[in-house]
Amino acid sequence: MPSSAFRRRLTGSAIALALVSPGIAAGQSDTTRAAEDTLVFRIDPVVVTATRTARPVSSVPQPVSVVQRRALAQELPNTVTDLFRDLPGVDVTGVGVNQGRPQIRGQRGQRILLLEDGLRLNNFRRQQDFGELPALVDATGVQRVEVIRGPASVLYGSDAIGGVVNIITRTPTEDGLHGTASYRYGNVENQSAGSARVYGRFGDLTLRAGGTLRSADPYLAPAGTFGEITLAGETTVLNSGVEDRSFDVRLGWEPAGSHAIWAKIEQYDADDAGFGSVDPALYAPGSPDIRITYPSQTWRKVTTGYRLQNLGVAIADRVEILAYGQDNERELDLGFAIPLGPTALLSQTSQNATDIRTYGGRIEARKAAGDDVLFTYGVDAVRERADGTDLNTTVITGFGPPMTEVSDRPQLPDSRFTSLGAFLQAEVAPTDRFTLIGGGRWTRAQAETFQTQGLDQDPIDITDGTFVAAANAIYDVNESFSLIGAVGRAFRSPNLIERFFDGPTPEGSGYQVRNPDLKSETSLNVDLGLRYSAPMVSLEAFVFRNEIDNGVRIQPLGTEVQGIPAFQNTNVEDLLFRGFEFGGEVRPVDGVRLGATFTKLDSKDALNEENPVGESFSTKATGTVRYDDPADRFWAAWQLRHNGDRKDVDLGTNPLGDVLPAFSVQDIRAGVTVFRTDGGQVHRVVVGLTNLTNELYAEFSNASFFRPEPKRNLTLSWQLSF
């Protein structure tokens, strides 16, 4: 028989596998399936991202946060990132209803790996500090979101230096046809969003289909003072609205037994989105006016999977084969105006159209060797091709007749990125109380450019290889208390923009010179922590140290190109990120939950402490008071978040001042079950009031390019499930 450590990992395996691999659970009883909705709300949810095996959070030997379906269903967030702000160690960058992106332990953009059901959403064409949009995945169809705080390159490859966000979509588990419908209204951005979704299981066949239509205007920020910036009245945050729509269809043949096959089609379209900005004439006359918009974006993805289980052969008990192809077409318009004197002005507009085509796959096998050893191994590959066009117009006025210059020179050559990796992980339980998980990965990456019309550049072919390894351990002191240690290396291959982009930066503040000689970033991360879980109390605390070698940062060259300062991405020898994270919850009586988190974060360039690298909060504290009626008639919650100021960041001449100032924000939400029908329909209404005190503030990663958050915002939603 397996040891108790393995039994703990496999406890309730039918339920665990129902949550992560619904096809495996096809033989469950109706009673077990009906229990799922209750179990996903429990205090110790089952997760899969950190280890690739279904196990309770309490037994994962890494820092993991989970956003469960209850929060997604009750609060109807714009995207899953709306629910990240109260997680320890996690922040959000970007404004507007579809532009929010995660930031983990001070890392953002391409240092965070975004997954959907374990497959990459990241692409190698995005800006380093932007990252891919979680909004590509419709939040109404998400089962849960698992956030790994720390590296995970052994299992997932490039980009997982700061952490991993795995968006796990909901799949059918109950016999018959079921579904949801919802409508959301937000007054501050005049948002209107309607969604519908169905799930069905008919014998061995499964069906999932749904979509969302949404319209939102640019929102209003409140009057007030933030740092040295003052807004005299309510102010429109320009280009923060969107018109978007999404749909997905999944079909599967998933019988009880050894086989399952499925396919899924997804599409997301967004029009008139933007980076968000406030007219600088309102708070700092004479400052550059920078506006970045996305007139259109279309993302399509086709995924298919085949799973064999209960094989019992020498090399594998379970094998899963996944393949996908996606196409991401995007238009970007950049406009900035720089005063050159009392009557003179330099204005530039750039229009870029990009088509990114990605093909990838993953083959993963699992094999138990005896009672106490479990191997997970496999290969994965991705090939990406990026093509685009550019049109840049520069106009100088105030020195006689306007001077106009037009160029269609591409800023990025036609290029391709290919990655092939192999990984092996072993999970060992030598005693009943101790579990060790260790593994390694080898990845070969190739970046190529091709002869491109309008560019007089020779093609470039760069190939490199990277090996990383990790070891994670958990020791159960007793049934409730565990000690955790993790050490691991991670890596990130420089993306196409960092290596080959040559032109004005999207923010308009400089000219980026290409650098094909960039090396891959590597990191060494150490986590030490503890967890305590009991019926009335649960808590965890971690200290971490993440040191990034050859960290890619954009640096000034001290020269000018086209009359603006020149910059180049270079490898900085040593970036250091350290911190402490705490999260806890107390349940004094039935239905009442009191929660709190605290995060402290410090970052620096270890070889040049005068070079500030801070891009996130220095401290963050959150508190939550929540009541859930045991009969599921209503719920109510109050949330408080306080971010401390941030000093180790270079704001240059930004009118905000020398320090990113502290702020506090409060939200209240409540929901009520209006009625239930004998046929199983449930109707609910949810009311939310965010930024209760109407404070002017900006999330720190949005502050240096001042993009404040919305004023006090009333949201109303109606939800139907059947």
Image (cartoon, rainbow, N blue to C red):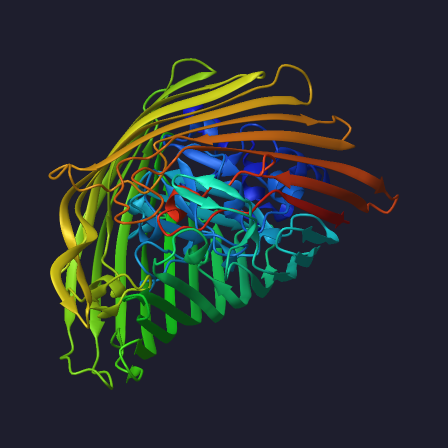
Asked whether the viewer can see residue 485, the reply is no
Look at 80% across and 44% down and name the residue there: 682
Instruction: Classify 154 as above or below 542.
Output: below
Residue 37 in the image, given as x and y percentages of width and height: 67, 39
- Using the rendered view, name the quadrant where residue 376 is placed: top left
**In this rendering, position of residue 125 left or right of residue 292:** left
Nearest the eye: 548 or 559: 559
Instruction: Classify 698 as above or below 362.
Output: above
Instruction: Classify 368 as above or below 1.
Output: below
**In this rendering, position of residue 625 left or right of residue 563:** right
Nearest the eye: 432 or 514: 514
Instruction: Classify 184 as above or below 601.
Output: below
Look at 77% across and 43% down and name the residue there: 684
- Using the rendered view, name the quadrant where residue 349 is placed: bottom left
**In this rendering, position of residue 124 left or right of residue 144:** left
Nearest the eye: 570 or 662: 662
